[in-house]
Amino acid sequence: MASSDTAVGGGASAGRVDGRGQSEVIGVILTVAIVVVLAAVVGQYVFGLDIIQAGEQNVGPQISFDTTVESGSGDLIIEHQSGNSAETSELSIIGSDGTIVSKGDSSFWTNENVGEEWTASESITIPSSELVPGETIRIIWESSTTGDSTVVMKYEYTP
């Protein structure tokens, strides 16, 4: 009987070691799973806020302009130097006294040989007759899909 007690005791002891081994593996798997879920939640929170803020700050095309006033005539030349192209149907040009070019005024852009998109190295001319010295000229982009708008150029006209 003593030998069967030892065998049962040995068997039970071996069973506990195997049981503990499974418990440790399950514990590690659960710990890793919890860490991964927490990392995903924190990452989504952090990156989610960053995407929203970036969207609010970067509305519209990023364009660099060069402005020149022609000596003699006083006409304002605005050249698209670099950056994104802009759909002319989404642009308007506003002066202090009101609108110079309305959004969607395709005839102005066609007369300026710009077309449907204003791209780098293309320029437009605003006649001095439409400008007042000291007025602020703004080119405003307005999305045709969302209605968001932003000033892409601001210039104080001084002939």
Image (cartoon, rainbow, N blue to C red):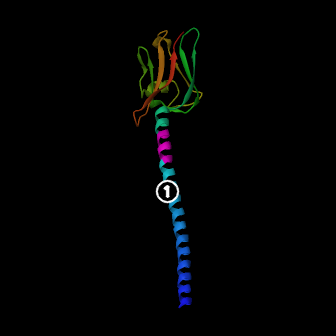
Q: Look at the image and tell me whether residue 59 can be seen.
A: no
Q: Look at the image and tell me whether residue 19 can be seen.
A: yes
Q: Which residue is mark 1?
A: 34
- Name the element at disc 1: helix
Percent x, y for residue 107?
Answer: 44, 26
Percent x, y for residue 101?
Answer: 44, 22
**In the image shown, does 18 or 58 lie closer to the viewer?**
18
In what quadrant of the picture does the C terminus appear? top right
Question: In the visual, does 141 lie left or right of 73?
Answer: left
Indicate whether 141 appears above or below 52.
Answer: above
Q: Residue at x 49, y 43 (%)?
A: 46
Q: What is the three-letter code of the residue carrying label 1?
A: Ile
The furthest residue to the front: 2
Percent x, y for residue 123?
Answer: 56, 24
- Is residue 100 within the magenta segment? no
Indicate whether 46 appears above or below 157.
Answer: below
Q: Which residues are magenta?
A: 42-51
**In the image shown, does 51 or 42 lie closer to the viewer?**
42
- Is residue 49 within the magenta segment? yes
User: Predominant secondary structure in magenta?
Assistant: helix
Label total for image:
1
Percent x, y for residue 50?
Answer: 50, 39
Indicate whether 15 appears above or below 79.
Answer: below
Indicate whether 59 appears above or below 126.
Answer: below
Circle 1 packing at 10 Å, graded few (<14), some (14-19), many (20+), is few
Q: Residue at x 46, y 34 (%)?
A: 56
Q: Residue at x 52, y 59 (%)?
A: 31
Q: Residue at x 51, y 50 (%)?
A: 39
